[in-house]
Amino acid sequence: SSAQEGLRILEQEKIDVVISDMRMPNMDGAEFLTRCKKSWPKTVRILLTGYADINATIKALNGGGIFRYLSKPWDDAELLEAIDQGLRICQLERDKLSLLLLTKTQNQKLQKFNEDLEAKVIARTNEIKQTADMLELVYEQLKKSYFDFIKLFSSVISSRKGLSKTKCQKVAELSEKLALALELSETEAKEIYFAGLL
């Protein structure tokens, strides 16, 4: 029955579309829709106006941010179409907000997942490095054990009658020098050295 009653209803209910006449007692439609825009910016505002109220219509367009205005007497089909479009705009706005919230939530989850994954990759990389370091240490110990075994075995062989430990050592050293002079790899030269010891 009045703009004040409309404002009271807006305070109590969730309203998507507001349809206002331009001419109302105590407050015109332009002022009413301007207040609606200020307090409930998401409402879709439609104005019903006569041809004589063009200046007031412009005021409502500028101040009230109206979605549509319809001239009186209005066509019922046109009014229903305007209401339907207004409701679709409200639904699209809600869908947009819902998608934004979903995107934000998913981005936060994705960021957390990436942080967790990064931490796991760092931890796994450290584990692999520790394993590689341990394998390197074991390999070095194995090489040393192998070399010690060869030396021990060479000592046993050179203790035979007619052989001396120095002869085996000299044969091994000369064999290694010869292998290096022939540009064999260090690994091959070391194997030849061991063969010389034996």
Image (cartoon, rainbow, N blue to C red):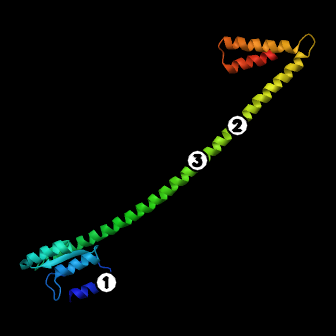
The quarter of the displayed image where residue 20 is located: bottom left
The residue at the point 17 percent across, 81 percent down is 29
Question: What numbered label is drawn on residue 182?
Answer: none
Labels 1 & 2 near each other (Cβ < 8 A): no
- Where is mark 1, residue-wise? 11
Q: Can residue 80 be seen from the camera position used here?
A: no
Spatial separation of the CA atoms under disc 1 and disc 2: 74 Å
Q: Which residue is the extreme one toward the right?
A: 161
Left/right of residue 118 with respect to residue 41 in the rendered view: right
Locate residue 10, reporting x and y percent. 29, 82
Locate residue 142, reporting x and y percent. 76, 31
- Where is mark 2, residue-wise? 135
Q: Is residue 10 above or below residue 135?
A: below
The quarter of the displayed image where residue 151 is located: top right
The residue at the point 30 percent across, 67 percent down is 92
Along the polypeptide, which appears first: circle 1 or circle 2?
Answer: 1
Spatial separation of the CA atoms under disc 1 and disc 3: 55 Å
Along the polypeptide, which appears first: circle 2 or circle 3?
Answer: 3
* Crowding at mark 2 (Cα within 10 Å: few <14, some 14-19, many 20+): few
The residue at the point 72 percent across, 13 percent down is 177
Left/right of residue 79 with respect to residue 122 in the rendered view: left
Q: Amino acid at mark 3?
A: Ile
Q: Is residue 88 above or below residue 176?
A: below
* Crowding at mark 1 (Cα within 10 Å: few <14, some 14-19, many 20+): few
- Where is mark 3, residue-wise? 122
Q: Secondary structure at mark 1?
A: helix
Q: Secondary structure at mark 2?
A: helix
